[in-house]
Image: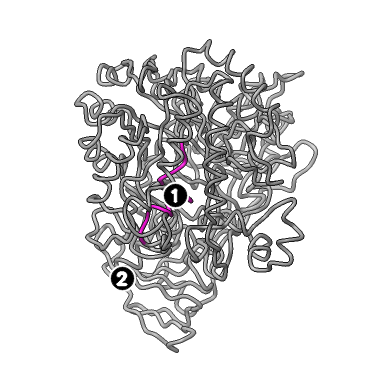
């Protein structure tokens, strides 16, 4: 291990509890050990338990599963009433502690206006009669109840109702009873969720979401009363020495409902600013909280708590370091933390530990690999959120996430095994086969890797001079460093496994008669729209991304999907003047694309006045300008030194699928990193 990481592997204490190292698994929704969106009478979640145990065995110091609602989301039963879960938890903890790791269980009061309503749930929340009928199963009105009447973050036409004092009392009692049972099960501590990220407890503390006039609104003390009552209740049931952490957002980074602040921006905070945070952390510490597990943001500025690649690495560290000066209890920092930077901050006493979430989904063994000096073997998290937390929101929609996605969060785009170990695993092949993989992109490399691990002989044929395929273009912008790392990781695995690779070799299935099976992973071709002037004056997105064509100052991007928006961001950061033309009524208006990622791009363009034309179509492209038909302004003429077409792709299979020919990835159906990697497993496991 490199000496620079040494501070990460020193012990520390939360009250009297010693943790063996300074690496914390950050809690992630979906890894709740008590189950998540389970059927009535939900159970102890053995899939989550398997992941958590794996992480503990792989040298993580403190493991914190995802949120456990103190009241079940389905059925409305209080968590403390289900004694069976706690018996199963005790048996799990007996084994867990053999790893040397410690575990806190995170409990949540609820979501308030941040409850990610899908269209059916939004309908229930708006219709009292329907909600009453559905409430024995799911009570949308209760799940969305907030401090005050507020707009739901996800459904534009849903207003929340105020939480009653009786409901607050019940929740406080539930925290205490649940914590008592958790302690009796042998768990090392609990975490209160949360004065953080704009969840229910946080909504009570924030001026813009708390308009109450009773003892829970108005003054600083009243706004934090709910959180203080919870710690008092837990300590009264569990004793002063039982460690209690608080998930905490230092600053809200919020300018308005559904509008967050950019890194480095000078703005007016409507949530918790640093001045209040300095006071709040001391107040919360003095009330009895034993640790602060910190980052920034709210659901209105969600990219601070769930940073996509567009956000800086270690994006919350400066603020977390600042508030540590005002408390004596341990302070943990999360948010795209780099081990070297975290180690330096710990060494200098600026934080006590670093929390890491989704990197553990991408590679549960990354800490062990770091210790052993095998950093090149760490599969990187690419911050895409396409499998772990793909709650979706665009103009006019509620949470447009598929129901199966809501029920199965904390999967991983680059590592299908996470939270799906019964579906995806390495099963030795019954008969070794020679498998030709035509196409050396991400999908082809993953298929070859899995086939080799199963005992087959995989051979990759790639027509270009390098591996990576279309993902090389996707990884081109400066902010896509993790995508570049993923390509490097795949290349290293191919070399390490000794997989035969033929570059500069264009073949068809007929050219490889010696292969027992053939996987075609040749990708897709860019779409072209028949716009006058396009063939003469427009380039494809890949031509720009790969640096095959240069661009001038004014660049019009046709297509406001993810690729088009990322190109616009890249151009903006290079000092160019991009403009986006999109035919839909919002940017990136697709399903299962995480709001943390898409809202960053929308907010960035809005804040920096990057022109975006929605409900618009291109009429004509000339050498110097683009004519755009808009819904409200009629024909608009945009200056254009260059035009980039980013209007999607279409499959380009070499051959139809058959018994021994398998189509993988975009050549079958255009998708994303998740679909191609999961598809590689689906095919490679069956051969």
Q: Quadrant of residue 12?
A: top left
Image coords of residue 398 (percent x, y): 58, 63
Find numbered disc 2 in the image and state the secondary structure of the residue it sits on.
loop
Find numbered disc 1 in the image and state the secondary structure of the residue it sits on.
helix
Q: Which residue is mark 2?
A: 609
> Between residues 195 and 162, which one lies in front from this camera angle?
162
Q: Which numbered circle lies on residue 474?
A: 1
In this rendering, would 620 be left or right of 253? right
Magenta stretch containing residue 118, yes or no?
Answer: no
Mark 1 or 2 closer to N-term? 1
| Image quadrant containing the C terminus | top right
Residue name at image x 53 percent, y 51 percent: 111
Residue name at image x 36 percent, y 32 percent: 288
In whole angstroms, how far apart are the C-alphas of marks 1 and 2?
25 Å
Residue 474 seen in the figure = yes
Image coords of residue 135 (percent x, y): 72, 55
Comparing marks 1 and 2, which lies closer to the viewer?
A: 2
Magenta stretch containing residue 197, yes or no?
Answer: yes
Q: Quadrant of residue 341?
A: top left
For label 1, the crowd category at 10 Å Cα-Cα, with few meaning under 14, some 14 to 19 and many 20 or more, is some
Numbered label tally: 2
Residue 156 lies, with reference to residue 466, above or below; the image says: below
* Boundaries of the magenta span: 192-207
């Amino acid at each position: 291990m490199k000496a620079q990481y040494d501070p990460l592997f020193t012990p520390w204490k939360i009250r009297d509890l010693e943790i063996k190292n300074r690496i914390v698994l950050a809690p992630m929704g979906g890894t709740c050990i008590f189950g998540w969106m389970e059927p009535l009478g939900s159970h102890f979640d053995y899939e989550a338990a398997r992941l958590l145990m794996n992480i503990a065995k792989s040298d993580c110091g403190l493991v914190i599963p995802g949120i456990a609602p103190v009241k079940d989301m389905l059925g409305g039963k209080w968590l403390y009433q289900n004694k069976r879960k706690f018996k199963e938890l005790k048996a799990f903890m007996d084994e867990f502690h053999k790893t040397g790791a410690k575990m806190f269980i995170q409990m949540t009061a609820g979501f308030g206006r941040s409850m990610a309503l899908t269209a059916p749930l939004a309908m229930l929340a708006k219709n009292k009669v329907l909600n009453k009928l559905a409430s024995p199963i799911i009570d949308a009105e209760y799940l969305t109840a907030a401090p005050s009447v507020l707009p739901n973050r996800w459904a534009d036409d849903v207003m929340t109702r105020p939480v009653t004092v009786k409901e607050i009392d019940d929740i406080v009692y539930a925290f205490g009873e649940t914590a008592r049972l958790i302690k009796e099960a042998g768990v090392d501590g609990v975490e209160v969720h949360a004065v953080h990220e704009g969840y229910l407890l946080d909504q009570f503390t924030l001026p813009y979401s708390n308009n109450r006039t009773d003892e829970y609104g108005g003054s600083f003390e009243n706004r934090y009363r709910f959180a203080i009552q919870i710690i008092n209740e837990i300590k009264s049931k569990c004793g002063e020495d039982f460690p209690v952490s608080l998930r905490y957002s230092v600053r809200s980074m919020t300018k308005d409902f559904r509008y967050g602040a950019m890194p480095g921006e000078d703005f007016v905070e409507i949530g918790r600013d640093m001045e209040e945070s300095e006071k709040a952390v001391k107040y919360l510490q003095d009330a009895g909280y034993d640790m602060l597990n910190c980052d920034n943001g709210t659901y209105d500025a969600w990219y601070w708590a769930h940073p996509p690649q567009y956000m800086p690495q270690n994006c919350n560290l400066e603020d977390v370091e600042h508030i540590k000066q005002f408390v004596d209890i341990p302070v943990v920092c999360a948010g795209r933390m780099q081990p070297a930077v975290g180690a330096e901050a710990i060494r200098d006493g600026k934080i006590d530990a670093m929390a890491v979430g989704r990197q553990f989904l991408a590679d549960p063994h990354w800490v062990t690999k770091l210790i052993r000096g095998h950093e090149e073997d760490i599969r990187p998290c690419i911050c895409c959120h396409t499998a772990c937390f793909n709650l979706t929101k665009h103009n006019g929609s509620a949470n447009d996430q598929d129901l199966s996605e809501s029920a199965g969060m904390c999967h991983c785009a680059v590592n299908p095994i996470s939270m799906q170990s019964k579906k995806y695993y390495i099963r030795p092949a019954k008969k070794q086969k020679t498998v030709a993989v035509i196409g050396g992109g991400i999908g082809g490399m993953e298929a070859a890797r899995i086939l080799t691990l199963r005992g087959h002989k995989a051979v990759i044929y790639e027509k270009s001079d390098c591996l990576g395929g279309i993902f090389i273009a996707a990884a081109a912008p400066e902010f896509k460093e993790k995508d570049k790392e993923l390509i490097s990781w795949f290349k290293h695995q191919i070399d390490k496994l000794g997989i035969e690779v033929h570059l500069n070799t264009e073949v068809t299935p007929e050219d490889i008669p010696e292969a027992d099976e053939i996987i075609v992973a040749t990708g897709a071709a860019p779409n072209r729209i028949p716009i006058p002037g396009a063939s003469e004056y427009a380039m494809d997105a890949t031509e720009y991304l790969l640096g095959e064509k240069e661009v001038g100052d004014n660049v019009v991007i046709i297509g406001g999907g993810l690729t088009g928006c990322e190109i616009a961001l890249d151009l903006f950061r290079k000092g160019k003047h991009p403009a986006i033309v999109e035919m839909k009524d919002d940017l990136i208006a697709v399903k299962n694309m995480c709001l943390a990622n898409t809202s960053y791009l929308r907010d960035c363009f809005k804040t920096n006045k990057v022109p975006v034309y929605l409900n618009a179509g291109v009429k004509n492209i000339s050498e110097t300008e683009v004519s755009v038909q808009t819904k409200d302004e009629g024909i608009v003429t945009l200056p254009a030194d260059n035009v980039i077409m980013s209007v999607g792709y279409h499959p380009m299979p070499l051959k139809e699928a058959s018994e021994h020919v398998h189509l993988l990835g975009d050549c079958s159906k255009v998708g994303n990193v998740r679909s191609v990697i999961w598809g590689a497993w689906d095919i490679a496991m069956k051969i």
